[in-house]
Image (tube, rainbow, N blue to C red):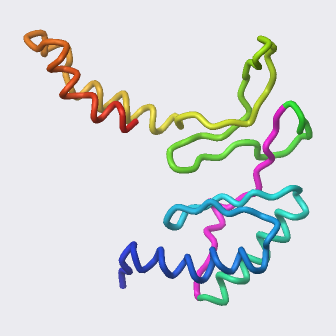
């Protein structure tokens, strides 16, 4: 049986979101539909929260997907320990350590998002499908009207 996305979202709101606010108050959940990221302060806390949430979902008749669930270490200039997993994708963004420049021009490592490689590939394919090289009869204003809504959405 297929459940509507609205009903599934409502179900997760009451069985997971509100439960986390009550039982795991020291963590923050970011959830979109059935995907989510939980921010923890330590690996020990992350392991405990994962066990708690796994049990909660089992109690509600759901399971965590074992292939998609993992603890990720947000490695940056202040957190330099080694960990097997230091990046993840969420909602089309790839979160990982990246070089950044501070206001004084110094380079450092920051854990930050950027468009994921899979989404970049689909963006390139979409732009290629427009066949811009064949639209030399259009003015810049025409091209702007045609493609700005899509580009702004990205």
- Identify which residue, 75 or 39, lies in the foreground: 39
The residue drawn where x is 80% and y is 47% is 73
In the rendered image of this protein, does residue 125 appear above or below residue 58? above
Looking at the picture, how far across and down is residue 57, in whole percent? 65, 81
- The magenta segment is 61-76
Quadrant, the C terminus: top left
Q: In the displayed image of the protein, which residue is found farthest to the front?
A: 103
Above or below, 108 relative to 54:
above
> Is residue 139 part of the magenta span, yes or no?
no
Picture layout, residue 141 above or below residue 97: above
Q: Residue at x 59, y 46 (%)?
A: 89
Quadrant of the snapshot with the N terminus? bottom left
Q: Main secondary structure of the magenta part?
A: loop
Front residue of this view, candidates 37 and 103: 103
Extreme residue in the left direction? 137
Task: Give the image quarter of residue 126.
Answer: top left
Point out residue 20 in the picture as x, y percentages from the top left corner: 71, 75
The reply to whether the magenta stretch includes residue 65 is yes
Residue 16: which quarter of the image?
Answer: bottom right
Q: Is residue 31 left or right of residue 151?
A: right
Instruction: Please give left or right for residue 21 compared with residue 44 in the image.
Output: left
Q: Quadrant of residue 148?
A: top left
Q: Is residue 56 left or right of residue 129?
A: right
- In this rendering, the count of numbered labels is 0
Q: Position of residue 142 (x, y in %)?
A: 14, 20
Q: Residue at x 77, y 19 (%)?
A: 102
């Amino acid at each position: 049986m297929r459940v509507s996305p609205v009903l599934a979202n409502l179900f997760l709101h009451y069985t997971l979101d509100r439960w986390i606010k009550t039982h795991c108050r020291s963590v923050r959940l970011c959830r979109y539909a059935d995907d989510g990221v939980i921010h923890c302060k330590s690996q020990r806390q992350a392991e405990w929260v994962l066990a708690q949430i796994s049990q909660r979902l089992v109690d509600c008749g759901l399971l965590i997907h074992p292939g998609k669930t993992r603890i990720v270490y947000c490695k940056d200039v202040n957190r330099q320990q080694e960990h097997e997993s230091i990046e993840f994708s969420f909602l089309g963004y790839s979160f990982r350590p990246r070089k950044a420049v501070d206001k004084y021009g110094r380079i450092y490592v920051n854990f930050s998002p950027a468009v994921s490689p899979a989404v970049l590939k689909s963006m390139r394919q979409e732009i290629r499908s427009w066949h811009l090289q064949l639209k030399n009869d259009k003015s810049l204003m025409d091209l702007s009207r045609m493609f700005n809504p899509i580009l702004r959405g990205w």
